Image: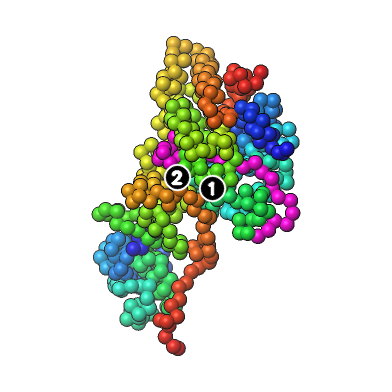
Amino acid sequence: MPESNLQRALEAKKFVVTAECGPPKSADRRVIEEKAKLLKDWVDAANVTDNQTAVTRMSSLAACAILKSFGLDPVFQITCRDRNRIALQSDILGAYALGIRNVLCLTGDHQSFGNHPQAKGVFDLDSVHLIETVKKMRDEGRFLSGDELTGERPAMFIGAVENPFAPPYEFRALRLKKKVEAGAQFIQTQIVYNIQRFREFIARVGDLGLLDKVYIIAGVSPIKTPGAAKYMRDNVPGLDVPNEIVSRMEAAGKGIEDKQARAEAWRQEGIKICVELIQQLKEIQGVAGVHIMAIEWEEAVPEIVQKSGLKS
Amino acid sequence: MIVADQKPIEEILQMLEPYKKVLFLGCQTCVAVCMAGGEKEVGLLAAAVRLARKQQGRPIEIIEGAVKRQCDDEFNEPWAKTIEQQEAVLSLACGVGVNKLSERFDVPILPALNTKFFGEVERQGVWAEVCAGCGNCILHLTGGICPIARCAKNLLNGPCGGVRADGTCEVAHNGPRPCAWVMIYERLGKLNQRQNIENIFAAKDWSSDRHGGPRKRVREDMLLET
């Protein structure tokens, strides 16, 4: 029986729900505790981001350990931006020792986007190498160099990410294949807004014979305001937000004078769009679950999960 | 070639502040071609510094010169006597030239340039970094396009998710650049060599790069008996 709750749920063919849990820009553990309480009954696992967008925050490892103590199954996101292979492997060992059973291997956002653009980026390994490394530690009891672990191996459930919405589109499924060959057992995708392009991506993944080798968890994210929708459409590389979604967000607040009421109408529409996307994703063969990225809006997760009919 | 930029004049004046008798020594190879430290730049910079120091009421005596390759003692030697008579030398060579002169002479050698990268001439007046000198070339597999130098994250299994819809990299700190992995993908398509990137490129051994410590190349057969 796998030790990872996420892995157990996926193997039991349950349509899983995971959620993102962003650590604070402070040493305040109560922020994580509050998010843990909020998410606990609604998700199969919670992802802790690793200094996302290269902004310094509480370490994902520490926040994962806090989530674990609240009974959640944490997914430890670990990037190659800030650690070389020595530190990466050390943190994998440490994470396992703290009871963390899922790891999501990423290359990481470039340091020039964050709050320390002066930083030296590491990028000793890339995400594919990191996946291979964790697998090697787990299955062979060896570090990347071949040196042997001297005791318990980190029995991690290994995840990776892929973005169907960045060029070259036809290569994305092949890149996912490389990650599966490296050892990825589950794949979390970039946020899906363009369902048609996502279907094409899944079809390509299917053509490569990968759908029974890896669990695909589709990323979703509720939009809070029309401005956020437009920003994501126009300014975030690798995101594909169709105009229709922007129009729906704009229409939702139209004619509402009261600021608070308008913001609430936007939020409701954002959640509605998210729920509709989840329902469409659920119908796509080969999609094993959804990962909800309600960035600094974790309160929306229970409502989205309920309204999607994933849990009552 | 080695591409360099001249430091801001304010910084150069600050470095020169303690000195009244200085040799400005250019280099006629890479930095002359990229118009940062050749004979012409020596003349322009010397004129600017003389003028500034005169205005400060602290005139400076500058000798101007340039050597073929400052990275080689052989070319610097004819200047030995002049150098030894200076309070300092302002080198307009790349950092290699500054180091070379510093190893040879007991005079402060000051850098007039910021040495940047190995570059190609992209077009008139534009130089771009395309090789990182990592010591372990894989260009035969990547269609002649280097992911180590040209990908912001030096990915070996790219492209990452940060490619814009137009195929440029999201990292645009030095102006928009095409995604190296999109270039590799397209180029390999043209060469009918896409199979090269279907398999995983193994983790790189960075010990051949600077991470193994400062590097040296020795050709035993070229050594002279001493």
Picture quarter with the N terminus of chain A:
top right
Identify which residue, B161 or A119, lies in the foreground: B161
Amino acid carrying mark 2 in the image: Pro
Q: Position of residue A110 (x, y in %)?
A: 49, 45
Residue at image x 53%, y 66%? B213
Residue at image x 65%, y 60%? A147
Disc 1 to disc 2, how far (Cα)?
A: 11 Å
The correct choice, above or below, for A151 with respect to A272 in the image is below
Q: Main secondary structure of the magenta part?
A: loop
On screen, residue B29 versus residue A76, left or right, reads left
The residue indicated by pointer 1 is A128
Residue B42 seen in render: no
Q: Quadrant of residue B84?
A: bottom left
The residue indicated by pointer 2 is B159
Identify which residue, A83 or A10, lies in the foreground: A10
On screen, residue B49 versus residue A274, left or right, reads left
Colour mapping: rainbow
Q: Quadrant of residue A52?
A: top right
Residue at image x 51%, y 15%? A265
Secondary element under disc 2, as helix, strand or loop, is loop
Q: Which segment did they paint magenta? A: A147-172
Picture quarter with the C terminus of chain A:
top right
Residue B196 seen in render: yes
Q: Position of residue B88 (x, y in %)?
A: 39, 72
Chain identity of mark 2: B
